[in-house]
Image (spheres, rainbow, N blue to C red):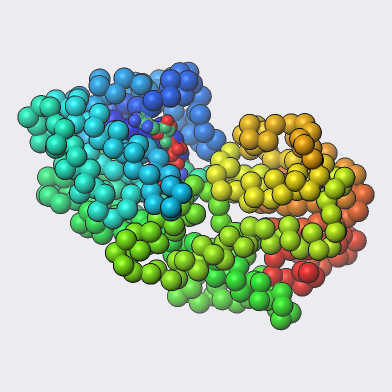
């Protein structure tokens, strides 16, 4: 059992902290947001993740986890401090490291015993060398401190499961002491550990994420070509997926990738390459294809409808993927403002993301269009002239094609997630446009 502190209680920090506690470690989670800390102390998770709240309550009751804004007490005698604060994108595409720097300084000024600082946040290659130097420069007490890299691979929507059953744990260290300590912290998980140096570890995270982004953009590119030549991307993906060198996962064409990771991690790696005088052309293409993909359906619908002014538009799904309330870089954020600008009357449905979306687009009429939030997909579809599907929530997938025809004024559907078979929608009498398949216009 180790005494651990975790800086940042977002998707990465909170899930890591709770899973460390579940494995028997003594964990203190630190955040600067007092309201979040109060919420967590009362057993409520500030983020939506399956199974998280149960584990929070169980481990809090067992006295293995606590939450605080008082970083001094959390850091001073920790064996290891995990950093899981954000590294958001800056306007030039580089990663903003200011949150990491703040935590590094707080650690340097508070630790009273030898300590391993473990960076879980996604940071550009070489950052951890600087974090280590930075902490040593500001250190107050004469203690040993080292920095290790331990990138996180969880996917939002299945974060707890991904952490407890990870395919691998990557650890990047520069000394036996750091490697052994980190291995002993992860031992109770019983998972494969890949131990490399710090820079390789930092690169693994970007290389893996950007590969997945490339896979998505490649399939979207091929899907767009399928539409032009009369092939079906679903059939094409199925045929490709049998080849084990390709694999059958992540071959779904759609409205592009969003979320807090792929968009920023592709841009950050491209930026890093540029800084070193290298042009990362593959990743740049993935970024470009994705940007166009997000508005693909809007452009198709605009051609078909001339204008959205005064039309009732059903929007099904607001979050960037199902299973999360996170809206970062979601396709809805690109499309809804364009629809409003055109004077659309939007009825939006999302099973968990509507409240967050309403903070950005408050319910009611704006200068041009209007937006209302409804609690069932049927309410959104009732009397609608057109429907856009942006997220593949189970609640949306479960709708029978007949529902669209029965409820909509004009059964015209633009599906960014290819939820339905083209034939089933046609048979139900729905004019159906999806990505990379027959009937796409
Ligand atoms: P997040 O924005 O959800 O959470 C960050 C938290 O850090 C916030 O609660 C914030 O209040 C807190 N914070 C900021 N400054 C602090 C400080 N000085 N001390 C303590 N807490 C502080 O972020 P996230 O989505 O969990 O991502 C964190 C990092 O992990 C990023 O680098 C991200 O790229 C990476 N990552 C994210 C995911 C994901 O799916 N979200 C997956 C893998 C890796």
Q: Identify which residue is drawn at 40% across, 40% down.
A: 86
Q: Viewed as shown, does residue 256 lie left or right of 191?
A: right
- Residue extending farthest bottom: 229
Q: Can residue 392 be spotted in the picture?
A: yes
How far from the left and from the top, in percent, is residue 22?
36, 33
Point out residue 10 in the picture as x, y percentages from the top left corner.
44, 35
Residue 182: name its quadrant.
Answer: top left
Ligand 1 appears in which quadrant?
Answer: top left
Q: Is residue 161 visible?
A: no
**Compared to 271, does 309 lie above or below?**
above
- Quadrant where the C terminus lies? bottom right
**As displayed, is residue 129 above or below residue 80?**
below
The image quadrant of residue 274 is bottom left
Above or below residue 12? Residue 69 is above
Q: Nearer the viewer, residue 280 or 328?
A: 280
Q: Quadrant of the N terminus?
A: top left
Horizontally, residue 225 falls left or right of residue 101, namely: right
Residue occupying image coordinates x 79% and y 33%:
365
Position of 439 compared to 164: left or right? right
- Between 433 and 301, the one lying in front of the other is 301
**Spot occupied by residue 211 in the image (x, y as percentages of width and height):** 44, 64
């Amino acid at each position: 059992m180790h005494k651990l502190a975790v800086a940042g209680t977002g998707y990465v920090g909170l899930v890591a902290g709770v899973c460390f506690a579940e494995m028997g470690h003594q964990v203190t989670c630190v955040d600067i947001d007092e309201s979040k800390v109060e919420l967590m102390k009362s057993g409520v998770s500030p983020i939506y993740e399956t199974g998280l709240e149960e584990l929070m309550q169980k481990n809090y009751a067992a006295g293995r986890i606590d939450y605080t804004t008082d970083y001094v007490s959390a850091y001073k005698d920790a064996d290891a401090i995990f950093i899981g604060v954000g590294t958001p994108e800056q306007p030039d595409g580089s990663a903003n490291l200011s949150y990491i720097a703040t935590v590094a300084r707080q650690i340097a000024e508070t630790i009273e015993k030898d300590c391993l600082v473990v960076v879980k946040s996604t940071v550009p290659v070489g950052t951890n060398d600087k974090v280590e130097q930075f902490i040593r420069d500001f250190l107050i007490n004469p203690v040993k401190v080292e920095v290790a890299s331990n990138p996180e691979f969880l996917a939002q929507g299945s974060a707890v499961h991904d952490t407890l059953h990870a395919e691998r744990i990557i650890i990047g260290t520069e000394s036996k002491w750091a490697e052994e300590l980190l291995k002993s912290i992860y031992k109770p998980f019983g998972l494969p550990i890949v131990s490399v140096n710090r820079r390789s570890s930092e690169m693994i995270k970007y290389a893996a994420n950007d590969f997945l982004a490339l896979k998505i953009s490649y399939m979207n590119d091929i899907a767009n070509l399928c539409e032009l030549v009369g092939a079906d991307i679903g059939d094409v993906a199925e045929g490709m997926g049998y080849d084990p060198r390709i694999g059958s996962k992540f071959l779904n064409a759609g409205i592009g990738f969003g979320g807090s990771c792929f968009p920023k991690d592709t841009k950050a790696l491209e930026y890093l390459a540029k800084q070193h005088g290298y042009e990362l052309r593959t990743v740049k293409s993935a970024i470009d294809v994705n940007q166009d993909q997000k508005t693909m359906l809007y452009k198709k619908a605009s051609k078909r409808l001339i204008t959205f002014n005064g039309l009732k538009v059903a929007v099904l799904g607001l979050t960037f993927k199902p299973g999360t309330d996170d809206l970062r870089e979601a396709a809805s954020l690109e499309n809804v403002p364009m629809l409003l600008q055109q004077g659309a009357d939007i009825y939006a449905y999302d099973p968990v993301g509507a409240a967050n979306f309403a903070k950005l687009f408050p319910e009611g009429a704006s200068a041009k269009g209007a937006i209302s939030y409804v609690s069932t997909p049927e309410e959104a579809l009732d009397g609608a002239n057109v429907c856009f599907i942006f997220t593949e929530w189970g609640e949306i997938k479960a709708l029978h094609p007949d529902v669209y025809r029965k409820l909509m004024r004009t059964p015209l559907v633009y599906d960014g997630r290819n939820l339905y078979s083209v034939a089933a929608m046609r048979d139900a009498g729905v004019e159906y446009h999806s990505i990379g398949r027959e009937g796409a216009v």
